[in-house]
Structure formats: C-alpha cells, structure tokens
Amino acid sequence: MCGILAAQYSKTSSLNLPQALVSMKHRGPDQTGLYSDKNHNTYIGHNRLAINGGKIATQPMLSDNTPWIISVNGEIYNDREKLKAKGAVFQTNSDSEYVLKGIELFGISFVASLDGEFSLCTYNRESNRLYLARDRNGSKPLYYYHNDDYFIAASEIKALLSAGVPAVWNKHYLVAKERFLVGAKETFVKGVFSVPPGHIVEHTNNELKSYPFCEQSPFNPDLFEPCDISYEQATQEFSQQFEQAVNKRIPQERFACYLSSGIDSSYISALSARLSDKAESFSIGFPNNPLDESLAAEKFAKQIGIKHHTLPLEHNDLIGSFEKSIYHAESIVPNLNVAAKYLLSRKVKESGIRIALTGEGADESLLGYQFFQYDLSSPLTQQSGPTPLFEGQATLETALNFTPSATISAKSNAQLFKSLRSADFSEACYTTHLVAPHSDIVTSSIGYSQWLHYNTVYQDYNLLALGDKTELANSIEGRQPFLDNSLVAFIHSLPTAFKYYNGKNKRILRDAFTVNFPHLHVEQIKKPFLAPTNLTKNITLYLLDELHELSNRESQLGIYDIDKVIAFFESVVKNQTQLDFSEDIVVCHFLSILFLQKHFNLEA
C-alpha cells in the first residue's frame, strides 16, 4: 500500500518532486518513488523504493515487452486465471503487475473490469500518454494539477503543494463547504482537482480529457435494471453476494474489523469470524456518555468469539488529535469524528495489524440515513429558490417536483457563514462544480437524493476524510465489503421496499443477518457515530486560542474575516456553556480551515 506521484513537464518547469516524495511517506509502510523516462521529463511513483543518502533508487513496474509503466494504490480482487488464459505470464503476486498485464492485452479500457479499491497511474512511453484512474466508488484518492508548463498528480494534495503547485484557497470549495455541497472533483486548493470516481483522466501533448470507464455508475442508482425477484430470493442472493464480498477481502494474516453496535459492522465482524480465525474487532469508547457503543460492541465480539479491543477516548484526546487529523484528511469537516477514527486506526497499527474491514457504503445503497427515510416517508415538493445551489438543480427538481431534504438542512448555517466573510467576499456567490444529471438519468426522488449524497458528503468526508486518509495516516489499509462492485449493482437493482419498508431501514441486510446468525442480536436503531464530547465550551476556547495566534501573525483565514470570526466565538463562550449541534458544526468548520491554513500557508 502506498501513494502515487506522477508528472509530465517542460524543461523550464520548477517542480520540486523529491520534496513531494518526502511529503507522502506516511501513506503506507512503503514509500513512493519516482521514475524518469529516457527524456527525463516524465516521472511516475511506485511502491518499491529505497532512499539512501538522499538518492532515490526505484524498482518501477515496467512492462518487459511493451511501453507501459504503472503504479497502483489499493487492492485488486480479480481472478488472474482469466488473464493467464489470454497468454499473460506473471512474475509476482502484485496488483500492479496484474493491472499492467491487463492493460498490455486490452488497453486502458481494461480498468473497467477491475474489482477492488484502487487509484492508479499508467504511462505509455511510445504515445507519451499518461492515464489516471480511480475505482467507481472513489475509495482511494488521486489528485491532479495542470497548467501550460506541467501536469502533476498525486495521492495527496500536500504532495502537489510540496512539488510547487501554488497554495491558493479554492473559494468555490469554501462556499460549497458552507452548505455541504462540495462536488466530487473539488478540493480546497485552487486548480487542484480530484479524479472523478469511475473515470479516466488522460494527459497527452499538454491536453487533458476526462471520461467515465463504466456505463453504470453506482452514484446513479436509477440506471440499474430492476431485478424481477421475490423478497425471499433477494435475501438469499444478498447473503451469498455479501459473504463473497467479505471473503475476498479477508487476508491470510491478522486483520481488524471496525465494530460498533450497528448492523453494518456487526455483520462484517460475524462473517469474518465465521470465515477466518484471524479476525479481531476494534471499537471506540466514550466513558459515561449516552452515545457510547463500546459495551454493546464488546458483548457482540464475545458472542462471535473474536478478540476485542476497546479504545477509550476523552474530550482532550479528540481535541489534541484534531489538528493532525485535519492535516491528513485535507478537508474541512463538521465534527471531531476524524480525530476519533484517526486514533482508532493508530490503535490498530499499534496492535500489529495493517488491514481493516470497514462498513462504508452500507447507508448509501441500503438507505440507512435519516434524510433518505424522510425523503421516502415525507417527500418535499420542489423547494429550490431563485438561486440554485448547483447547476441543473432547478431543472431536475422541476421534472421530479421534489427537493431532497439534505439541501434544506444544508442552508441552516449559510447566513451565519456569509456574515463572517471578509468584505471582498461577503456578497460573492461562487458556484460549486457540482452539476445535476439529466432527468433521464435520475428518474426517481430517492435516486436524486442518493445521487446528491454520493457526489458530495460521501466523497469528500465519508470515504476519504473519515475513511482512507485517517486510516492510511497510520498505514492501515481499509477494505470495504459494502462497496463490492457486484453487490452494489445488485442492491441498486432491488425495489426500494426491499431496502426501506414501514420505517425499517436496511431491511434486507437486517433480515439476511437474522437468517444467517439467528442466535445473535443487533440494535435496530444504532447510535450515530459521533465524537459526542465536543459539544462543550472547551473546544470553542481552544479554537479562540488558535484564532488569536493566527491573528497575531496577521495571517488570513480563507475568505473569512478573522476578527469577525473571533468576535462571534467570543460571544458564544460568553452566552453559553454548551453548544447546540449547529454551532458545534461551525466550530469544527473553522478549526478545519485554520489548520489547513496553518499547515499549507494558503493565500486567499
């Protein structure tokens, strides 16, 4: 497991690639190397590297008889026998070689057949074409920057900044974050974009183009052909597919299952315990708190017979780790959950484990979130005002006569954020890069609600900030059974009533669990994964200390007026001893901005 670094540039470019290499060391147990072709103008990172005396020694994955070079970050689960039948001869067990052999045989379109969590970079030395790609869910990050002098890509934004990409705030991102509507392509740095999930970005002759490699994106559930199947048959098929998804992700070594009191992680843990004797479970405990799940998790782990680890966390643990978590997450976040997840991943690493099975994706496909349930039980008719939040919103909502409840809640703090902007930006209305699909792609209200979440909070927060990035900061490789290609496609083909029925969310998952583990019991209504102890005055005082320090250095705070922000939080501390939920989001929002500003020296 490692990061990726790749570049194509002119001889006049001032890229600092060795420094970018250093900035990416933490992404895994291996470091990321560089490869130079015979013209010394193309560099590609790889996962076999030794650094001696400041010199870079690489063992890049080059083809023996074709012009292809490749670097892969992630895990691929495809069966090698199919390529062997086509004449492929393998020298190693690496995923990089598997993908390389497939591209040799079938070209870049081969990535559409890949099963797993991955981002990759591949380069053809004859055509001088550089390709980037991410799996269809976007499980692994990959970013790029392009101008007249060079094209550079990396698994982390900090590597691009270390290489010389200008550190300038993306104002569109800042405004979109105020409403939780950051699109899948956007980042906090101007001109730095994320490779869209399920897409290939191709660079040649200083020209850039991006196109999807799969016909049916999991982000568009309405595109999947409905399955004519009874509920009993669907439950049986779901059980089989989910077991296969878990089984293919179980390594031949000790591994972790992140376990809460909910059905997602409980089913993964129970299946893991049945399929392997190397599974161990890990939970977070918040002592003396109503949202604590550790006791229920410990009880469940004992029932399924696996070794369990509980990480007790206090308020100061979360605050003390938040800055480091933001540095790794490279995102503005609404709560301290990233700190909790960062500390949990560190606990797994300290236990001598490097792979963890996680539950991302279940709430998205199986309609587990409350806003999905609200949209199904009490759907809103079209609510969008004269100024749409993103391109195409009004057109789609007119066609469906529906507005997702998530867009309404997204406006709750919008006026407050706007009031804290600097004078230069107070009235500016920057657009997000998010673009609504046509009504022939999204044909149902719940499909629209799912599309919106998949392309915003799910990408920037759930999968990356709360998932891969806090895990890889501790060299933990997260694997996500609920994002299995076949499983997601099957779930999207099922009627909505199989997933949500009479107030019961994740219906088919719960019933499959009951059939397969009748002696086990899981809470029907799970406590939300929250770091609850941040709802106090202490974190606001901590933020104020950091803001005053930044103000004393006459530094900026993105598009916001630092004096206005300080005055606002001083009034909060004066008038309250405890924050309500919406104010808590604002505190974490500005702490995130402050730490990004502090570590990356961003200009407005």
Image (spheres, grey):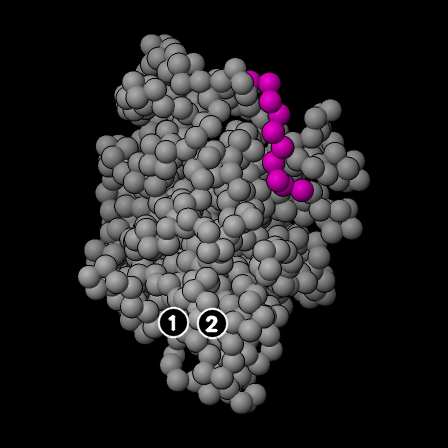
Residue placed most toward the observer, 116 or 281: 116
Examine the residues drawn in magenta and state their main secondary structure: loop
**Res 104 visible:** yes
Q: Residue at x 46, y 35 (%)?
A: 168
Q: Is residue 277 left or right of residue 174?
A: left
Within 10 Å of the Cα at label 2, are there few (<14), some (14-19), or many (20+) other Cα atoms? many
Look at the picture and state if 99 lies above or below 527.
Answer: below
The picture places residue 353, in percent across and down from the top left corner, at 26, 62
The residue that disc 2 covers is 69
Q: Is residue 434 magenta?
A: yes
Q: What's under tag 2, amino acid-wise?
A: Ile
The picture places residue 213, in percent across and down from the top left corner, at 63, 63
Residue placed most toward the observer, 286 or 413: 413
- Which residues are drawn in magenta? 426-435
Q: CA distance from mark 2 to mark 1?
A: 7 Å
Q: What's under tag 1, amino acid-wise?
A: Pro
Quadrant where the N terminus sits is bottom left
The picture places residue 379, in percent across and down from the top left corner, at 69, 36
Tell me whether circle 2 and circle 1 mark residues in contact (CB < 8 Å). Answer: yes
Please, what secondary structure does the residue beneath circle 2 have? strand
The tag on residue 60 is: 1
Look at the picture and state if 365 lies above or below 601.
Answer: below
Look at the picture and state if 387 lies above or below 292.
Answer: above
Q: Residue at x 53, y 42 (%)?
A: 191
Q: Residue at x 69, y 37 (%)?
A: 391
The picture places residue 409, in percent across and down from the top left corner, at 57, 29
